[in-house]
Amino acid sequence: ITPVPAGRKLIENEIIHEAWLAPKIAVIDIEGILVNEAGPPLLTDGEHAVSLLVEKLDRAAHDRSVKAVLLRINSPGGTVAASELMHYEITRFRKRTGKVVIAVMMDVAASGGYYVACACDEIMAHRSTVTGSIGVVLQLFDLTGTMAKLGVRPHTIKSGDLKAGGSPFETLSEKDREIFQRIIDDMHQAFVEVVAAGRPGLTEEHVRKLADGRVYTASQALEAGLIDRIGTMRDAIEVAKKKIHAQKVNVVVYHRPLRYVPNYYARAAVGGDINVFKIEWPAWLRRPTARFMYLWVP
């Protein structure tokens, strides 16, 4: 509920001020399950994750004072499409602006969250971060046994034997499984290639060995070459300073009106919403359709 009419255009909030006219570092959040759609207003802030990222990157691109971006990632991943789009937009931002982008992993930056991080100049993680989970998952379910117990018989009219493949109202055939596995394998290969491209020290062959779906602690990821260093947000700011050759900087975040952001630990992506019950359902449960996911699902 927005209590008063308000514009939705992003505004800038300075959370660290070190000197007047100093270069800026923008902190941009990528959080939650990544989907290429707006979330339901009742259960989330209603923002479209990809659109919001592009909006914030554009704001940073058009501000000549912004010399670096800290991409703060706290996500278990999401859909293949959303992860790819975010990776593309960050890569495009770096190429067209020449500005430094550093990924800073928070609690979790797994699967699609790690995919996005591979678009950055450098990847940092907190010591307690969980990352990795390089792989693809498609979750289907079979209701035929339950329906048989209830005396319910589904009738599907389809143009071909494979048209309803993966439907919960039909048992998954071996042919359906083979087709889905081929799709999964193609998407997995794309993930491996993205990691190999984003981590020059790793060959595609080595990435494939790491990409069995497991998650890694920050120290394990550092040893494997999946990240560049372990540190905090303050450490990330110091790294950014060195990369842009600045002794003092001002750190800013972008957010909707009616949202106070006191420091870089505060969430910056939400507008002024008030819900009596703030219940967050997993994105893959909010829609009945099957989705190919770069997602860590423990």
Image (cartoon, grey):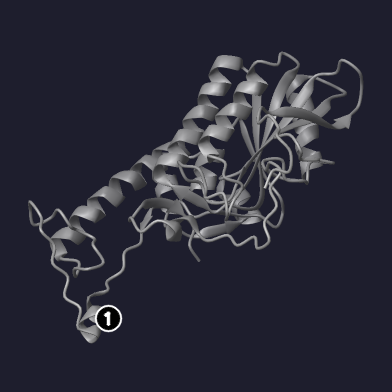
Residue 199, visible in the rendered structure: no
Compared with residue 203, is residue 249 higher up or lower down, i.e. above or below?
above
Q: Does residue 150 appear left or right of residue 8 in this picture?
A: left
| Mark 1 nearby-residue class (10 Å; few <14, some 14–19, many ≥20) | few
Compared with residue 224, is residue 142 higher up or lower down, i.e. above or below?
below
Identify which residue is drawn at 61% across, 44% down. 227
Identify which residue is drawn at 45% across, 58% down. 286
Foreground: 121 or 284? 284
Q: Position of residue 266 (x, y in %)?
A: 77, 46
Q: Amino acid at mark 1?
A: Thr
Q: Does residue 217 appear left or right of residue 214 in this picture?
A: right
Q: Position of residue 202 (x, y in %)?
A: 49, 40
Foreground: 133 or 172? 172
Identify which residue is drawn at 46% across, 54% down. 295
Identify which residue is drawn at 20% across, 78% down. 152
Question: What is the tally of numbered marks visible in this picture?
Answer: 1
Q: Does residue 186 appear left or right of residue 18 in this picture?
A: left
In the displayed orientation, state which residue is furthest to the front: 4
Q: Position of residue 40 (x, y in %)?
A: 52, 50
Q: Does residue 108 appear left or right of residue 81 in this picture?
A: right
Residue 298, visible in the rendered structure: yes
Q: Quadrant of residue 164?
A: bottom left
Q: Position of residue 154 (x, y in %)?
A: 17, 70
Q: Quadrant of residue 145?
A: bottom left
Secondary element under disc 1, as helix, strand or loop, is helix
Foreground: 144 or 77? 144
User: Badge 1 is on which residue?
Assistant: 146
